[in-house]
Amino acid sequence: MKKIILVSLTVLFAFSNSNAQEIPNPITTAAPFLLIAPDARAGGMGDVGVATSPDSNSQHWNASKYAFMKSQFTVGIIYTPWLRELTNDVFLGGFTFANRIDERSAWAASLKYFNLGQIDLTDINGAPEGTEKLNEFSVDGSYSIKLSETYSMGVTLRYIRSDLGIESANSTINPVNSFAVDISGYFQSDEKNYGDFNGVWRGGFNVSNIGPKVSYSDDGQDNFIPTNMKVGGGFDFILDNYNKVSLNLELNKLLVPTPSISDDGEPPYSQDDVSFFNGIFSSFGDAPGGFSEELKEFTWGLGAEYLYDNSFAIRAGYFNESDIKGARKYFTIGSGFNFKSSKLDISYLFNASDINNPLENTLRFSLSFDFGDIFEVN
């Protein structure tokens, strides 16, 4: 029963094309909520955020960006009703506080809470065994520092709690506690003149959730947490004092071993018996389909943002994942409204695949407040 429940929960985050010509072989992990794009700004740009300009929710994407934020303090609040096509009681919420200490460094703290709603339990005969309310959360602390006028690095320490604890007559799923680390870097060029417009180049990377495997059961079966690599770049077209257009590209790859294919052509739910550290490096060359399948393990996103007078923003984006690795393909749109020190962002997601997507019609909401001294940035 517990294996069925775990697989069912995994479906909340990844789905595959059962009609594809190739055998679906998605990578599944424990605590996949750690990879959910939490904020509406990035959510409106195809879930792109590792190299965009700093904001209150940079903790998730690239904590190094906080060393370049303009305000001394920022507070961010996020809320996302999740999988509304399937259920009405699952949501992601959280908040972030960041402080730019001086011209070179910053720190931030954040909480992300994922409510999985209520699950009705039954025995093997279908008889009711009660209900359980499941949730997961993470608490983060980060420090970032400029190593030069244009480049910063950061480190994030994360506590993870995955409470999928279910007790029944047939099986038990235990809550999980773990720790992980992010290592990130961010580049932001000086503003340069290109004739008819000025421009700023940006680049960033983040290797997130570096941490040990966890186990939900007492049978010795361990699960990788979603160690992930993000790499991206972008360019800001500064047309004049009022108009700016930003274009961004981002690549993602799970640094987790790919499941091997069994003799009957189905991927097993267990993963290779390797340490999390070795799994990071082996993930670049362990796909059963060889180099072609390795390339399909990269997802990519494109995002654009138009900002008028630092007061109103329009955003659009696209996210793409291979059909055999999850088949997530969707467009996003969003908008933002700035009033003095406060910002409100909203985004909407709609499916771009022939396959039904449980993320269809996802709405994200973000609210942030900036206060304190203003720093000059480049």
Image (cartoon, helix red, strand yellow):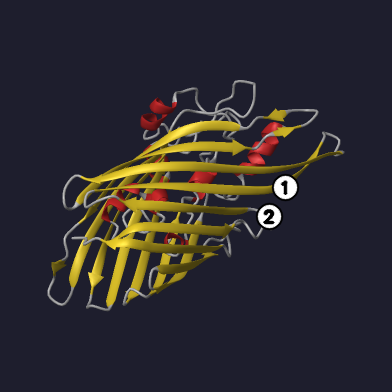
Label 2, residues with CA under 10 Å away: few <14, some 14-19, many ≥20: few
Which residue is denoted by mark 2 in the rendering?
89
Quadrant where the C terminus sits is bottom left
Between 65 and 280, which is closer to the camera in this rendering?
Answer: 65
Pinpoint residue 364: horizontal percent, then vertical percent.
53, 62
Write the residue at 69% across / 38% down: 5
Whether 15 is drawn above or below 81: the answer is above
Write the residue at 64% across / 39% down: 7
Q: Is residue 101 left or right of residue 165?
A: left
Quadrant where the N terminus sits is top right
Which residue is denoted by mark 1 in the rendering?
118
Between 65 and 298, which is closer to the camera in this rendering?
Answer: 65
Q: Which residue, as the protein is rendered here, is positioned at the far front?
A: 372
Write the residue at 64% across / 60% down: 84
Pinpoint residue 2: horizontal percent, then vertical percent.
70, 32
**What residue type is disc 2 on?**
Asp
Q: How many marks?
A: 2
Between 106 and 83, which is closer to the camera in this rendering?
Answer: 106
The disc placed on residue 42 is: none
Q: Is residue 261 left or right of residue 71?
A: right
Pinpoint residue 360: horizontal percent, then vertical percent.
58, 62
